[in-house]
C-alpha cells in the first residue's frame, strides 16, 4: 500500500513526487513509468539542452502563452511560476541562463543535468521508480468519502491512497479515465511546421527572417453586385520565420500551429497563408520608399536589396514579381514595383500538410478543464485523483512554456495532497 502513486515518469510526475516527498517525510511514494527510461521528453527538449522555462515572470503575461488553459492557469501561476522554477533548480546547484529570445536553459547546456537532478532527488527522498510498468487498469476502491485506488500493471497490482496522473498525451490513460466518468477533449497535434512547395522558397532552406503570417478563412458570400468571396482573418502571428527543406517553421509558424490546432485540423492541414516579409512597413509606405529609391539608384533591382531581409529571399521575390534580372531602378515601372510590394507584404503560400516539430511533442486535448479544481489539481469527479502536465487539456507555444505547465501542475498537486494528508492526520 502506497500513500501516493504517480503514473508517468516524466517532468510533471517527478516534480510532483519530489515536492510531495519533501513536504511529507516518511510517506510511501512510487512512480510508474511505462517505458524503459524515465524523463525521455526532458532528454530531447531544446535539442538536448532542455528548455526548462521562459523568462516571463508576471503570472498574467505568462498565462497568455497557453492557447488552451490561459484562464485556468492564472491562479496556479500566482502560486508557482517561472521564478519559482528558477529557485527550485538554483537551490539544487543548477543555475539557469536566459537566452536572447527569453528561453531558459541550464548553464551546462545539457538536459542530462536536469535528469540527474530529478533522479538523484527521487533516490534521496526514497521515492521508488518502476520502469516498464504499463498501466492496464485504474480502479477506485473503498468508500467515496475515503477513496483509494487500485492500479493493475502487466506485472502486478498496487494500491494507493492518492493517485497522480502525469501521463502526458496517452490515449490508453484517457480511455481509462473516460470509463471512470471523465470527459476527454479529443486530441489533435499542436506544435507543427507547415509543408509548402513553392518556387519562392524551395531553394533557400536555412534562411530565417522576421515575418507576419496570417491564415484566412475564405467563405462564399453575396453582395449587391452578385457572388463574391469574403476573406476573414482567422489567425495571425509575427516573429522569426525559418525556411526549411519541407516548407516553413520557426516561432511565427509554431505559434500559429498552437493557437490554430483545432481550426487547422478541421482544414485537414490544407490551407493558404499570407506572409508579410516586411511587417514594419505599410504597403503604401513601402511603394513610396521604392519610388524614392528609383529616383537615386541606377543598379538592377535584383542586385539592390532595399529591405533588411536575406539577399536570396529578396532575389526570389523580385523574380516572382515578374521583374527580370536586367531591369534597373530607372527602368522599372510603378506597376512592377507594386507587384514587388505585393510579393513582400501579401505573399500567398499554399500549405499541404504538416510535419512534427522535432524538439516538441505537444497535443491539444485531454481531460476537460471544467472537471478539475485548479486550486489543487484534483478531479472534481473522483476523490483523491490528481492531474499534472499534458494529460489535461492544456498546451502552450514553444519556448519552455509546456515544461512550466508541468512544473506548476506538479507543485500544485503536491500542495493539494499535502494539505489533504495533514487534514487527515488531525
Image: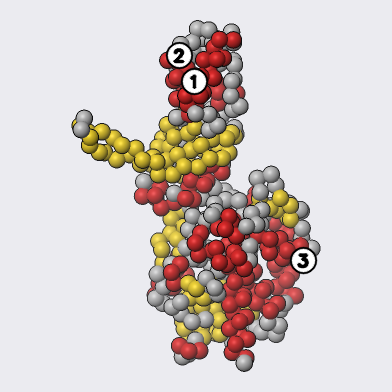
Q: Are marks 1 and 3 in contact (CB under 8 Å)?
A: no
- Nearest-to-viewer mark from 1 and 3: 1
Towards the viewer: 363 or 153: 363
Residue matched to label 1: 287
Asked if residue 311 lies left or right of residue 92, the reply is left
Q: Is residue 205 left or right of residue 176?
A: right
Tell me if I can see residue 94 in this picture. yes
Is mark 1 in CB contact (under 8 Å) with mark 2?
Answer: yes
Q: Is mark 2 on a helix, strand or loop?
A: helix
Most extreme residue toward the bottom is 426
Point 55% across, 63% down: residue: 74
Q: Name the residue under label 2.
A: 334
N-terminal of the pair, mark 1 or mark 2, is: 1
Query: Which of pointers 2 and 3 lies earlier in the amino acid sequence?
Result: 3
Looking at the picture, the colour scheme in use is secondary structure
Q: Position of residue 29 (x, y in %)?
A: 64, 80
Residue at x 49% of width, y 82% of height: 383
Location of residue 346 in the rendering, given as x and y in whole percent from the top left corner: 45, 29
- Residue placed under numbered mark 3 in the picture: 91
Mark with earlier residue (1, 3): 3
Residue at the far right: name it: 93
Classify mark 2: residues with Cα within 10 Å, few (<14), some (14-19) or many (20+): some
* Dot 2 and dot 3 residues touching (CB under 8 Å): no
Instruction: Decide if residue 351 is in sight here.
Output: no
Q: Distance between the residues labelled 2 and 3?
A: 63 Å
Q: Which mark is residue 377?
A: none
Front residue of 181 and 69:
69
Amino acid at each position: 500500500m502506497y500513500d501516493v502513486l504517480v503514473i508517468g515518469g516524466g517532468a510533471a510526475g517527478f516534480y510532483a513526487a519530489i515536492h510531495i516527498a519533501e513536504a511529507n517525510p516518511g510517506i510511501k511514494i512510487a512512480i510508474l513509468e511505462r517505458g524503459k527510461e524515465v524523463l525521455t521528453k526532458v532528454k530531447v527538449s531544446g535539442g538536448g539542452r532542455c528548455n526548462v522555462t521562459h523568462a516571463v515572470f508576471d503570472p498574467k503575461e505568462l498565462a497568455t502563452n497557453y492557447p488552451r488553459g490561459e484562464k485556468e492557469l492564472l491562479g496556479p501561476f500566482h502560486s508557482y511560476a517561472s521564478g519559482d522554477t528558477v529557485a527550485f533548480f538554483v537551490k539544487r546547484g543548477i543555475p539557469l541562463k536566459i537566452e536572447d529570445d527569453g528561453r531558459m536553459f541550464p548553464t551546462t547546456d545539457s538536459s542530462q543535468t536536469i535528469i540527474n537532478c530529478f533522479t538523484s532527488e527521487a533516490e534521496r527522498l526514497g521515492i521508488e521508480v518502476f520502469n516498464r510498468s504499463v498501466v492496464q487498469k485504474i480502479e477506485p476502491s473503498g468508500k467515496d468519502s475515503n477513496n483509494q485506488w487500485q492500479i493493475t500493471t502487466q506485472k502486478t497490482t498496487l494500491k494507493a491512497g492518492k493517485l497522480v496522473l502525469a501521463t502526458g498525451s496517452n490515449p490508453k490513460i484517457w480511455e481509462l479515465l473516460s470509463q471512470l466518468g471523465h470527459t476527454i477533449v479529443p486530441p489533435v497535434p499542436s506544435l507543427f511546421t507547415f509543408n509548402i512547395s513553392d518556387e519562392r522558397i524551395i531553394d533557400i532552406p536555412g534562411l530565417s527572417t522576421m515575418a507576419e503570417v496570417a491564415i484566412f478563412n475564405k467563405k462564399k458570400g453575396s453582395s449587391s453586385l452578385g457572388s463574391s468571396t469574403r476573406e476573414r482573418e482567422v489567425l495571425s502571428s509575427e516573429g522569426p520565420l525559418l525556411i526549411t527543406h519541407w516548407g516553413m517553421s520557426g516561432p511565427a509558424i509554431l505559434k500559429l500551429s498552437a493557437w490554430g490546432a483545432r481550426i487547422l485540423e478541421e482544414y485537414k492541414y490544407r490551407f493558404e497563408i499570407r506572409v508579410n516579409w516586411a511587417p514594419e512597413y505599410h504597403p503604401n509606405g513601402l511603394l513610396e520608399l521604392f519610388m524614392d529609391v528609383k529616383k537615386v539608384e541606377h543598379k538592377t533591382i535584383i542586385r539592390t536589396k532595399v529591405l533588411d531581409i536575406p539577399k536570396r529571399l529578396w532575389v526570389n521575390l523580385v523574380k516572382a514579381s515578374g521583374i527580370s534580372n536586367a531591369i534597373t531602378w530607372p527602368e522599372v515601372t510603378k506597376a512592377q514595383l507594386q507587384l514587388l510590394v505585393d510579393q513582400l507584404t501579401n505573399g500567398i503560400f499554399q500549405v499541404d500538410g504538416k510535419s512534427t516539430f522535432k524538439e516538441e511533442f505537444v497535443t491539444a486535448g485531454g481531460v476537460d478543464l471544467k472537471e478539475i479544481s485548479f486550486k489543487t489539481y484534483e478531479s472534481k469527479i473522483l476523490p483523491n485523483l490528481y492531474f499534472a502536465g499534458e494529460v489535461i487539456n492544456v498546451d502552450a507555444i514553444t519556448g519552455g512554456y509546456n515544461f512550466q505547465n508541468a512544473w506548476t501542475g506538479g507543485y500544485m498537486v503536491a500542495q493539494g495532497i499535502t494539505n489533504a494528508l495533514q487534514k487527515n492526520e488531525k
